[in-house]
Image (tube, rainbow, N blue to C red):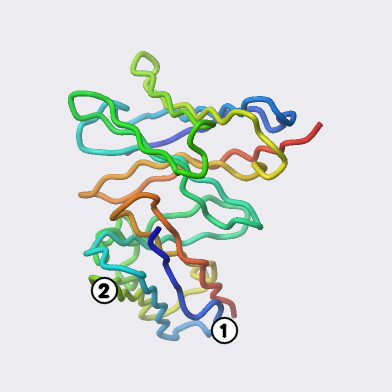
Amino acid sequence: DIQMTQSPSSLSASVGDRVTITCRASQDIGNFLAWFQQKPGRAPKSLIYGASSLQSGVPSYFSGSGSGTDFTLTISSLQPEDFATYYCQQYKSSPHTFGQGTNVEI
Amino acid sequence: QVQLQQSGPGLVKPSQTLSVTCAISGDSVSSNSVAWNWIRQSPSRGLEWLGRTWYRSKWYYDYAVSLKGRIDINPDTSKNQLSLLLSSVTPDDSAVYYCTREDWGRGFEWGQGTLVTVSS
């Protein structure tokens, strides 16, 4: 199985901050990488697919980059509604695997 | 706009079969450009991919090795929905279950989730 390692596991930030979350795959996954946002008690919401494509309806201050094994989710200016947990997922090969999550808190 | 509406019993007894349904609107379960996944989430396991199905002139299935023999994903074209069946459940199968639509050109959509508790 492909292991997905996210860092950091948690971070504290303020409104307006630039936030960067990284995800590393244990083997080459090309650009088959997605990022999700999850708030407590809610289903995950897709932000990024194909490593860098913005899901329809997602604000443009979210961006994704990377390919191969190293990927980054960037929130260029953190908004109050962005405090949540963020997950990466590879869908290059089965089983599709997730990172352990990054909790972004105030 | 694609929407996935899940339904299913919240409580299942040990050794019985868990069944969760995902009703699809805004797309067809037999679309030849997407795949349909089942994922679960629990405090102990985090997010865990269970399996998926997709249609490319015929149906294909792909299941997590850890669940093979217990899991079945059934597409129902007459009702345009997807079902997850997980047999011989134990309390370790208690989780929130999600269906998702995977579109390599448009990303992912998630159902709202179904909390299933396995308990006698």
Discs 2/1, front: 2
Numbered tag placed on residue A35 in the rendering: none
- Residue at numbered disc 2: A65
Where residue B116 appears, as percent x and y from the top left, is 66, 37
Mark 2–mark 1 Cα distance, whole angstroms, equals 22 Å
Residue farthest along the right direction in this orientation:
B120
Which chain is mark 1 on? Answer: A
Where residue A68 appears, as percent x and y from the top left, is 24, 70
Horizontal side of A78 relative to B15 (left or right) equals left
Which residue is at a point 42% across and 82% down the rendered structure image? A19
Horizontal side of A72 relative to B92 (left or right) equals left
Q: Up-down: is B77 above or below B70?
A: above
Which residue is at a point 34% across and 71% down the rendered structure image? A62
Q: Up-down: is B3 above or below A49?
A: above
Q: Up-down: is B16 above or below B2?
A: above
Q: Are marks 2 and 1 on the same chain?
A: yes
Q: Amino acid at mark 1?
A: Ser
SS for tag 2? strand
Compare residues A22 and B120 and report the one nearer the observer.
B120
Where residue A41 appears, as percent x and y from the top left, is 62, 53
Where residue A52 appears, as percent x and y from the top left, is 25, 67
Quadrant location, the C terminus of chain A: bottom right
Q: Earlier in the sequence, mark 2 or mark 1?
A: 1
Cβ atoms under marks 2 and 1 closer than 8 Å = no
- Residue at numbered disc 1: A12
SS for tag 1? strand
Which residue is at a point 20% across and 49% down the rendered structure image? B105
Q: Quadrant of residue B60?
A: top left
| Picture mark count | 2
Q: Amino acid at mark 2?
A: Ser
Q: Quadrant of residue B91?
A: top right
Q: Residues within 10 Å of mark 2 (few under 14, many from 20)?
A: some
